[in-house]
Image (spheres, rainbow, N blue to C red):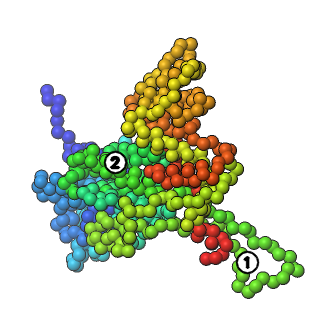
Amino acid sequence: MAVIHLLPTDLANQIAAGEVVERPASVIKELVENSIDAGARRIAVTVEMGGKKLIRVEDDGSGMVPDDARLAIERHATSKIGRSEDLEGIATLGFRGEALPSIASVSHFVLRSRARGSESGTEVRVNGGAVTAVTEVGMAEGTCVEVADLFYNLPARRKFLKSDGAESGQISRIVTQLALCYPEIGFTLTSAGRKVIQCPPVSSLRDRLYQLYGDRADLVEVRRDGDIKVLGYVAALAEQGPTRGPQNVFVNRRIVKDRTIAHAIIDAYSVASIKERSPEVHLFISMPHTAVDVNVHPTKAEVRFRDQSHVHEVIRRTLGDALGRGPAPQLQLEPPRPYDAPATTLPLPAGYATTYPSRWTSEPSGTPAPPHPFAPSHEAFAPSPDRTLAPSEAAPVIRPMIALGQFRDTFIIAVDDEGIAIVDQHVAHERVLFERILERLTTGRMESQRLLEPMLIDVSAAARQTLIAHAADFERLGFELEEFGGGAVRIAAFPALLTREDCEAAVRAMAQDLEGLDRGSRVEDAIKRIAATMACHAAVKANYPLTGEKMSHILDELRRTAYSTICPHGRPVMLRLTRREVEKNFQRI
């Protein structure tokens, strides 16, 4: 007796829908991408109960004639491709013809569409994949899709949906991502009768970023031209905000989650610091459509690159260059509260300010970022003609500074032509030594000094195993250590950079740093951790008086470093008080 049989069409459609439609947010992503492909200039999204009860997506795109509207809900019906060769260079967001029939098979579905120039539109009603009515309707040019009672016929799938608030959050995130990538399109998101997102069309990525995230002077601009174009904004190295930030990555204006790009981002930050981070990133990557395969995932969330290593290196280097030019954090002054004068006080001169704002903040420094270069029109996104500096020609982060003195024998107070800088002398010297150590390691090994009488250090069993396992790495840095027995480690030589007093503390700290490193990690990771700890223990300490020559030496060496805003462990090197902030608080501007 045969045990293999064909599934009913409606069941097969529901199974296929499960691959494309994961939750309400994925429905909205598919529908909005169809609107973008149709050339819409305004897109309105409305949801109720986190999209479980109702999803409505309206656009002013090209619309569809009656025959196309009927055919659009058939599986694998599409206007995007026609032959297998078209898969090699897909330029649209949709192309499989699966989204609408998949959504219609698990909901009460209504499609209304009117082609430009047509006198009327067409309405197609579908319940659980079965067409129930096709009628002529009056409507504006464009398309409107309503999805009600999502997964009503799949209770097993519906019960796995999150709360209304959680699903609404996912919807807000996906609409934010799409709006960020297409600033030339107006987006509106209404949830439970409340306007959550309202972004009129704008001319640049910078303007859209402001609409969605507010004034973000703390982000660093990223820009690269060539075979792989890169544009965007990323968190500065010295940014002390949340450990995890939003990461919006787009390839050819398509939202993607790619391990190659994610690894390149982390790599770019780890070059300057061993601090683990998941930084805020808004990154737009553009390359020939033939160099990337988007047909490798049911929801098109992943892509495959023809030359993966080249993409990784381009992203890593581009972000590394931008981060090296990132700004130091700026201090903000709190102006004094107005003085409540007694009645006998002489009157103030006419026009004299008697009140102050509750908080004055400095305006972002630097040239405004050029607009987005990847829009189809290319007009609103062309590079600004008044841009005078290419990224490679940009001024260094730290200008030549004059050291004025120390504050509490810990901070160097310095000035340049743009303001006042407060430099943490230990952190600044640590950054200088860290880069010097890594530079010397590229040419060989560090200089070491041999001890006439070896040093014995008692450590825990776990620390001893960690140190011995990385003995070869320590040797490159000038250490000679071996297991001595009885829970001790024998140090026969240590780097000339350290003093004997600092050696024991440095070894213990390095054992602790390396203990958390995965066994499968690269040798470079271990070396960088050891180098960072060595630099920390060799650097000048806080509460240590410095001569004018030593302060000037640290500032000059800091200017020559590649990443001068943070130490290897992620702490800020300096805080700046800009001239403009000072002038504002003295009411000179």
Amino acid type shown at disc 1: Thr
Q: Residue at x 23, y 47 (%)?
A: 307
| Mark 1 crowd level (few <14, some 14–19, many ≥20, 10 Å Cα) | few
- 64 vs 349, left or right, is left
Q: Reply above or below: 198 against 290.
A: below
Q: Secondary structure at mark 2?
A: helix
Total tally of numbered discs in the picture:
2
Q: Is residue 272 visible in this depiction of the protein?
A: yes
Q: Reply above or below: 575 against 343.
A: above
Which residue is at the front of the view, 216 or 170? 216
Q: Residue at x 46, y 59 (%)?
A: 396
- 65 vs 494, left or right, is left
Q: Is residue 58 visible in this depiction of the protein?
A: no
Which residue carries the number 2 mark?
Answer: 261
| Image quadrant where residue 110 sits | bottom left
Q: Residue at x 50, y 17 (%)?
A: 483
| Mark 2 crowd level (few <14, some 14–19, many ≥20, 10 Å Cα) | many
| Image quadrant where residue 251 sits | bottom left
Q: Tell me the CA gap for discs 1 and 2.
A: 54 Å
Q: Residue at x 42, y 39 (%)?
A: 440
Which residue carries the number 1 mark?
Answer: 354
Which residue is at the front of the view, 468 or 449? 449
Residue at the right extreme of this rendering: 344
Q: Quadrant of the C terminus?
A: bottom right
Which residue is at the front of the view, 478 or 377? 478
Question: Measured from the top left, where is residue 26 in percent x and y?
Answer: 35, 53
Disc ID at residue 34: none
- 39 vs 491, left or right, is left
Question: Measured from the top left, where is residue 21 in percent x and y?
Answer: 32, 50
